[in-house]
Structures are given as structure tokens and as C-alpha cells.
């Protein structure tokens, strides 16, 4: 069997195994969310200011909230299997439309963040390790330590203060200038400009983490026997660093990055709120307060699918980086 | 008179300040001629590996450096060579092979790529030419399917194949000097014999000078033309192989050589007919399980132990010998019930213990104990030595004061200072730690001791001491011992009877002397034939063997 058919088989099996996991996540989330006091009707009634108990009971019956929990769960599961994620009473829209609308924004933010954090983290770590114990190494290490220790929301706020308010270089919030009605490349450029601050904010912490990991990993690999062999073969230090050591040193960083995609979604709640980025994080935050359980469940499900898919991608990258890992 | 390829004069290698000693190598001088094999012999810490690295300018800079002397390679002092000149020399004029072929190769690069690099960085050749040369090299070192091995990664090859690839790499540009740093230490004895022969053949073919670093006098006897013996960074003796091995002058050389166990088996001691341990039809299989959800094809299945039958008599030492992967350690772990078996019977004094639960097994634990191979990994680094020894008896319900008293006794029995009681394992050397391991296993006053390669991680002089200790306590305490080893020399000196294992099966059993004199199975013959230095020191040293047996 060739490697590519092996990988196809592996991917399909992993996706298949993901189904029961997602099902379990839905069920657990369903009960967890229902453990919290209050439902959408309470919130609606509270906002309306004057709702009689009869009207509230009527609303509950309409939303199906008067049924016992297991029945509600079964109804929900049945709908999910038919790819119907329910209806958000709060937004007056089907949940799936809402989520997919926002998914693009979050997906864009996350992709850019991961690329920036892993890319620059690896680069800085590599540089620090190559220039060990010089001023470059010291600057990079101090930078990594400081960003590592600074809270995310504070960085976000300070970036807005400096780059948007004082210097006026970048927009404070949002994903695009809606009023300008840009089209084509102008719109892409507009979104890119809006993207800078949230991406940098969200990635700083991870960037610091990967810088430190990469540096340590490089130093560890430099001490390995195969490096002595490479020197004994008369290779240049360049070749040893970039071909022999780098690939081995990348392995732990890739593993870590894969694991942290889930945490990144959590981090995006804060960043999206600070920068009013219209993504899933902000949507989740809002729906939590509106007790919009259908919407929350939908977001959770999408997040879990995302994590499973990203882990799969990381595993596949890993088996290309490390021939010792066999797909089976 | 042959041309001197390499001449080292008064070499000093300095260690970082605060090390145990100031110089790793002190005032070392040696010479190597074309086509000659010079063995540098010494125990761990003698500075032999650093000497080898210094020749290639590969000392772990900046902490360890050459602080004096000259290393002349074809009359050019490499200690003063520029970085670029050194890089030129490395891999093309002087090349090196290392001890551990798994870690010495880059795990994520194919063998073909790793050979190719040498050509790319030293000579200009077209890509197809380079590939052709690499395949040719792999064929020269007798690797099967060279085309396939080009694309293989190190983990896909066996230890011997990896070392062959390393040699192919080292000889790619027909270097004038080959430095081999313990190249066969990590290999099985039959593989070792093949690799030694390969190095010999390659050397004759291209008249290479070989600087061979080793701790094994058997290997020295087989391949060396001249020998340099090092101790604590100083050359204590040098001369032709015949001089050094057969009439050593320096006391250290004499001690080292007399510590090498003779291949002449000891006489079997009288034993009682009573069988203390009986194993019947023991089977153990690894893998073969299904994946989590029960579909997909089953994992690869390895039958580690196949239908093994053993009888251990009261007061005898039964050796289990075999190469790595033969299942001897698995067998030991199954017998002591650290692993569950698939099927089979294990009985102690006629009582079946296989299949007992953990709780039911507990009273039997003080009958049978184990000494492990690696004295560094098998002692908990956070527990004091006294507690390590006393823990067993305390778990068995013996009064704590009593157990501590016994632990102190044992510490002196195994020849350690009484102060060892309150220290941690890392404060001891390898040999001392193995003594602690032995004391620990004796604390429960076992009747049966299973020793799993107890000396294979130790230097030869320490090895002799530990073997002597095991001998003494066995007689003192009337122990029956199951002794697992890959080293036939050790087996010859320790075991009354031997069981030879291969691929999980016992292929031959018999009294040690009989088995050595007249091996029946072809595998036993192969093993015996592969022991390095067998011509040397077989008949000649029988007198010392006799005196050992008498004193025991």
C-alpha cells in the first residue's frame, strides 16, 4: 500500500472516530448548559419588563422548553443529525446561518494568529539558539518573557491606545469599514488593516511560548549525537542548523501548536470582545448572557469539529516531518 | 618503514574549571601508520573518546579544549588548522564512526540523503553519479537491497545495518584515517563479529589507518596491531598487541586483563537434586490487540517467549544467554510475575504461582527477587539507600527497626561503607549502585535470585568485583540463581548450567563446560564463534580460573 492511500484511509478512519466524540460533546454540553439557572424566556421576559406567567409558559411551550430535558435532548439530537442546528430566538435567525456567517471572521483571525505565532516563534527561537548568549539572544529572551507574562486583554487595550488613538495608524475595532462599501481588492485591503491589531494581540502570548520552546528544542537537538556525526562528516554549520537540527527541533513545537488550537478559541473570546471583531467568540459571549442555548450548543459543536479537524491536520503534518510516526 | 599518518605529541586536553580533574588527557603521545590498527583501551572516563574527538577538532567547545601538544596529520598540526581546513579534513581525509548507531544518525533523514551530504560538501559530482556511488558504498558494506536502504530511515534498520550504513558514510571518500569510537559496543556479539570483519576488510582494501577506541580486550585481541592503554587521561602502557595482552607490564593493564573473564568454563559445583523453580510451557505474546473501537487490522504480534521449560535446582546458577530480542528479559519478568503470561506454569518449591493475584502473590515475593541491569535507572533517585533496602521487608510486615538493622547489615555485606545508609543513589558510582541493587534484592532473604544482565552496564574491573560479590553471597546464603546475560565470557565464569535462547525459544540447555566444549545447536556454535578474542586467553588462563573456583 502506498503512503498516500494509507493517509486517505487514516484520515477517513479518524473522521469516522470523531463522530462519537462530537456526539458525546453535544450531550455533555447540553446538560452543562441546562444546569445554569434561567432560560431564554426569562431573559426575554426580563427585557420586555412586563410578562405574565401565562405568557412565559406560552413562550416556553412554543420554544419546546416545557418538555422534560431528555426529550429536549432527543429532539435536538434528531435535528442535528438532519443538519438542523435549531433556531436562535434571540437573533431571530437559524443557528446554522448565524454561525457560518461568523465562522469566516473567526477562521480568518485564527489562521493568521497561528501562522504568525508559529512562524515568528520558530524564527525567533532559531535566531536565539544560533546566537546563543549574545545580545540578540538576550533581547529575544527578554521579549519572550515579557509578552509571556502580560495579560491578553491589557495588551489589546494598550495596542488600541497606542496604534489607534495616539498614532492613528490602525482602526480601533470591527472587521471592515462597512460605511465605505469597498469592493474587490479594496475590501481585502480594508479587512487586512483591521486584522492587524487583533491578530498581533492574540498571537503575542503564543509567539512568546513558541519562541521559548523552539530555543530550548534547538539547544537540546544541538547536543544530540547525530550533530557530532554531521560535524564529523565535514558539513557546514549552516547545513547542520537548517537541515539537521531544525527539522528535529520543530517536532515539539508542532505538537504544542496543535494542542493549543482549542485554547486559541477560548482566547479569541477576549480579543474579539476588545476589538469588536464579529466572530464566533463574541457571538458565544453574547449568547451566554442571552441564555440562547441553541446558539451556544451550535458554537460548541462547531468548535469541537474544528479542534478535531485541526488535530488531524497536525498529525498528518507530523508524519511528514517525522518518518518514525507511521499512519496506521 | 611505513609513513606516519598521524602523530600525536604531548597532547593535553583541558576540562572546564571545577571538574573532577584538570586535564581529561595528559601528555598523550601516539602514532598511527598507514594500514595499521591502533587500539586505545581504557575504562569509562579514561579520556579515550576525547582523544579521538580531538583528532578531528570535535571537542565539545568551548568548555573542553586542547591546551597543549600537537596532533600532526600528515605533518600538518590540526590543532592549529582553520575552521575551513578542518571541515575539509573531516569526512574526507579523516572520518569517524560512533558507538550508538541509532542516535548517531539523524532520525528524520533517509540514509541515502545522509550519505549524499558527504559528496555534496566535499567533491563536485552530478546527482546521478552521487546516487550511484552511494548505492555502491552500501553494497560494499554488504547491505542487502542497497536501493531500498537509500530511501530507508534509520529506525527502519537493525542496529547492525545502521552501523554498516555509518561505515559506508565514513568510508565514502576513502579517508586515510578511520576513527572508530566503540563501534560495536551497542551491538550483539554475532553482529559485532561481522562489523569487526567488515572494518578489517575495508582497511585492507584501501590501506586505511584505523584508530579504534574500545574497552573490550576481546575486541583488541581480534583486531589490533598495536595497543595503547589509558587510565585517568594518561597513557600507562603501549606496545604491540602481543606484548600488551600477553605480557603486560603496568599494574593497571595487568589488573584490567585479569578482570576479563576467561572463556574457559568453571567447573560446575555440586548441586542438590531438589528443584526450587520449575517453569513449564511458558508463553508470552506482545501486540496482536485490536484498535480501540475493535476494527482495523490487529497490531503486529511478537511472540517473545515460546513454550519455555526451565528447572532451577537448589544452589545452582542457571544462565540464560542470548542476543537482544531473544526474549530473555521478558522470560525473567514473567517468572517473577512482573508481567502476566499467556499460558504456562511457574512453580516455586512445587507451589504454582502463575495466575495468583497481586495479593495472593505477596507472600511469595520474599522467595524470589530480582537484580536489574541498569543501576542508574532501577533505583529511585528521591529515596535514601537505607530506605530502598528496608522498603521490601517493611512491606512484607517486618518490624521497621528490624528491617533497618538488616539493611545496615546488608550494606556491609555488599561491601559498602556504613554511611551509605543515609545517602541518595546519585551519590554513588555505577558499581556501587549495583551493590545497592543487590543489597535490596537480598533484604527479603530470597531463595531464588534472578539477575538480569547485572554487569553489562559496568566497566570490566567493576564487573569482576560484582561477579565475585554475587558468587560470595550465593554461597553464603545458599541462593539459587537465574543469571541472564548476553556475554558468554561472564556466563562461563558464573553459571553451572546454561540455556541458550533465540527468538523466544530455548534452543539448547546443558552444563556450561559441556555446552562450551561440544555445542549441539548451530546457533550456540555461532554465538561461541563470535566471542571476540577467543583464541587469546582460553587455555592460557585456566590456572587463574582454578584458583577462583577454589576461593569461592
Image (cartoon, rainbow, N blue to C red):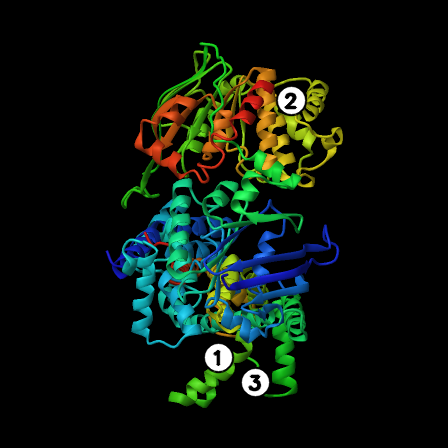
Residue A149 image-quadrant placement? bottom right
Q: CA distance from mark 1 to mark 3?
A: 12 Å
Q: Position of residue B87 (x, y in %)?
A: 52, 71
Q: Position of residue B304 (x, y in %)?
A: 36, 34
Q: Nearer the viewer, mark 1 or mark 2?
A: 2
User: Residues at marks 1 and 2, common chain?
Assistant: no
Question: In the shown orientation, is residue B131 left or right of residue B551?
Answer: left
In the image, residue B411 above or below residue B110: above
Query: Going by the picture, which residue comes out furthest to the top?
Result: B273
Q: Which residue is mark 2?
A: B394
Q: Chain of mark 2?
A: B
Q: Position of residue B414 (x, y in %)?
A: 66, 26
Write the residue at 42% across / 60% down: B207
Give the tally of numbered discs: 3
Q: Which residue is mark 1?
A: A175
- Name the foreground residue: B280 vs B469: B469
User: Residues at marks 1 and 3, common chain?
Assistant: yes
Q: CA distance from mark 3 to mark 2?
A: 71 Å
Question: In the shown orientation, is residue B173 left or right of residue A245?
Answer: left
Q: Which residue is mark 3?
A: A170
Amino acid at each position: 500500500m502506498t503512503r498516500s492511500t494509507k493517509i486517505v484511509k487514516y484520515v477517513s478512519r479518524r473522521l469516522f472516530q470523531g463522530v462519537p466524540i462530537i456526539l458525546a460533546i453535544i450531550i455533555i454540553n447540553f446538560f452543562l448548559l441546562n444546569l445554569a439557572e434561567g432560560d431564554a424566556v426569562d431573559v426575554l421576559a426580563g427585557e420586555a419588563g412586563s410578562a405574565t406567567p401565562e405568557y412565559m409558559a406560552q413562550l416556553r411551550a412554543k420554544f419546546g422548553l416545557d418538555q422534560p430535558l431528555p426529550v429536549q435532548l432527543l429532539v435536538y439530537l434528531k435535528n442535528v443529525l438532519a443538519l438542523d442546528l435549531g433556531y436562535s430566538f434571540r437573533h431571530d435567525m437559524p443557528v446554522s446561518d448565524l454561525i457560518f456567517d461568523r465562522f469566516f471572521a473567526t477562521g480568518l483571525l485564527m489562521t493568521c494568529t497561528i501562522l504568525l505565532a508559529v512562524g515568528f516563534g520558530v524564527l525567533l527561537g532559531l535566531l536565539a539558539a544560533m546566537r546563543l548568549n549574545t545580545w540578540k539572544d538576550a533581547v529575544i529572551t527578554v521579549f519572550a518573557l515579557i509578552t509571556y507574562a502580560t495579560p491578553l486583554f491589557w495588551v489589546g487595550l494598550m495596542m488600541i491606545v497606542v496604534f489607534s488613538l495616539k498614532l492613528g495608524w490602525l482602526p480601533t475595532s470591527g472587521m471592515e469599514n462597512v460605511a465605505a462599501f469597498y469592493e474587490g481588492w479594496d475590501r481585502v485591503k480594508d479587512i487586512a488593516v483591521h486584522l492587524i491589531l487583533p491578530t498581533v494581540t492574540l498571537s503575542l502570548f503564543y509567539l512568546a511560548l513558541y519562541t521559548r520552546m523552539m530555543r530550548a528544542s534547538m539547544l537540546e537537538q544541538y547536543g544530540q549525537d547525530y550533530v557530532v556525526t554531521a560535524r564529523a562528516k565535514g558539513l557546514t554549520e549552516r547545513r547542520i542548523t537548517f537541515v539537521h537540527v531544525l527539522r528535529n527541533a520543530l517536532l515539539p513545537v508542532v505538537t504544542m501548536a496543535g494542542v493549543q488550537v482549542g485554547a486559541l478559541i477560548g482566547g479569541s473570546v477576549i480579543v474579539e470582545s476588545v476589538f469588536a471583531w464579529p466572530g464566533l467568540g463574541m457571538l458565544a459571549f453574547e449568547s451566554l448572557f442571552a441564555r440562547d442555548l441553541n446558539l451556544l450548543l451550535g458554537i460548541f459543536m462547531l468548535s469541537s469539529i474544528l479542534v478535531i479537524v485541526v488535530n488531524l491536520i497536525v498529525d498528518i503534518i507530523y508524519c511528514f516531518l517525522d518518518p518514525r510516526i507511521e499512519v496506521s | 618503514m611505513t609513513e606516519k599518518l598521524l602523530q600525536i605529541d604531548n597532547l593535553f586536553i583541558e576540562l572546564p574549571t571545577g571538574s573532577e580533574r584538570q586535564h581529561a588527557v595528559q601528555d598523550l603521545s601516539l602514532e598511527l601508520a598507514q594500514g595499521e590498527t591502533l587500539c586505545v583501551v581504557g575504562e569509562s572516563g579514561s579520556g579515550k573518546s576525547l582523544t579521538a574527538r580531538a583528532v578531528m577538532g570535535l571537542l565539545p567547545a568551548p568548555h573542553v579544549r586542547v591546551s597543549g601538544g600537537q596532533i600532526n596529520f600528515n605533518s600538518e598540526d590540526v590543532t592549529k588548522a582553520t575552521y575551513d581546513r578542518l571541515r575539509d579534513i573531516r569526512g574526507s581525509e579523516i572520518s569517524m564512526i560512533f558507538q550508538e548507531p541509532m542516535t548517531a544518525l539523524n532520525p528524520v533523514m533517509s540514509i541515502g540523503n545522509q550519505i549524499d551530504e558527504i559528496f555534496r560538501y566535499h567533491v563536485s559530482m552530478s546527482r546521478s553519479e552521487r546516487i550511484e556511488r552511494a548505492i555502491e558504498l552500501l553494497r560494499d558494506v554488504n547491505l542487502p537491497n542497497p536501493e531500498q536502504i537509500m530511501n530507508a530511515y534509520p529506525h527502519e534498520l537493525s542496529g547492525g545495518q545502521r552501523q554498516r550504513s555509518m561505515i559506508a558514510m565514513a568510508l565514502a571518500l576513502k579517508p586515510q584515517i578511520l576513527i572508530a569510537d566503540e563501534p560495536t559496543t551497542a551491538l550483539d556479539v554475532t553482529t559485532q563479529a561481522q562489523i569487526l570483519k567488515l572494518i578489517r576488510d575495508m582497511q585492507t582494501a584501501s590501506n586505511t589507518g584505523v584508530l579504534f577506541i574500545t574497552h573490550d580486550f576481546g575486541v583488541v585481541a581480534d583486531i589490533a596491531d598495536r595497543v595503547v592503554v589509558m587510565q585517568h587521561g594518561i597513557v600507562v602502557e603501549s606496545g604491540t598487541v602481543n606484548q600488551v595482552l600477553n605480557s603486560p607490564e603496568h599494574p593497571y593493564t595487568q589488573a584490567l586483563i585479569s578482570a576479563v573473564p576467561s572463556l574457559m568454563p568453571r567447573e560446575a559445583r555440586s548441586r542438590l537434586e531438589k528443584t526450587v523453580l520449575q517453569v513449564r510451557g511458558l508463553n508470552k505474546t506482545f501486540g496482536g490487540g485490536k484498535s480501540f473501537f475493535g476494527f482495523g487490522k490487529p497490531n503486529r504480534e511478537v511472540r517473545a517467549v515460546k513454550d519455555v521449560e526451565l528447572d532451577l535446582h537448589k544452589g545452582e546458577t542457571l544462565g540464560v544467554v542470548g542476543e537482544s530480542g531473544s526474549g530473555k528479559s521478558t522470560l525473567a519478568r514473567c517468572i517473577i510475575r512482573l508481567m502476566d503470561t499467556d499460558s504456562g506454569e511457574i512453580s516455586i518449591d512445587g507451589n504454582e504461582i502463575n495466575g495468583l493475584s497481586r495479593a495472593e502473590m505477596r507472600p511469595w515475593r520474599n522467595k524470589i527477587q530480582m537484580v536489574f541491569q541498569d543501576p542508574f535507572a532501577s533505583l529511585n533517585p528521591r529515596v535514601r539507600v537505607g530506605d530502598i533496602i528496608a522498603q521490601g521487608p517493611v512491606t512484607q510486615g517486618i518490624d521497621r527497626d528490624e528491617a533497618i538493622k538488616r539493611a545496615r547489615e546488608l550494606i556491609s555485606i555488599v561491601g559498602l561503607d556504613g554511611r551509605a545508609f543515609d545517602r541518595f543513589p546519585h551519590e554513588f558510582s555505577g558499581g556501587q549502585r549495583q551493590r545497592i541493587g543487590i543489597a535490596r534484592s537480598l533484604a527479603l532473604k530470597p531463595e531464588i535470585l534472578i539477575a538480569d544482565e547485572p554487569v553489562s552496564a559496568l566497566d570490566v574491573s567493576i564487573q569482576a568485583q560484582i561477579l565475585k560479590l554475587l558468587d560470595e553471597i550465593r554461597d553464603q546464603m545458599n541462593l539459587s540463581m537465574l543469571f541472564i546475560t548476553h556475554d558468554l565470557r561472564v556466563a562461563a565464569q558464573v553459571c553451572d548450567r546454561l540455556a541458550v535462547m533465540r527468538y523466544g525459544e530455548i534452543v539448547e540447555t546443558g552444563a556450561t563446560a559441556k555446552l562450551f566444549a561440544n555445542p549441539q545447536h548451530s546457533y550456540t556454535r555461532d554465538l561461541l564463534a563470535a566471542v571476540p578474542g577467543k583464541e587469546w586467553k582460553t587455555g592460557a588462563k585456566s590456572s587463574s580460573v582454578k584458583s577462583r573456583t577454589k576461593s569461592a
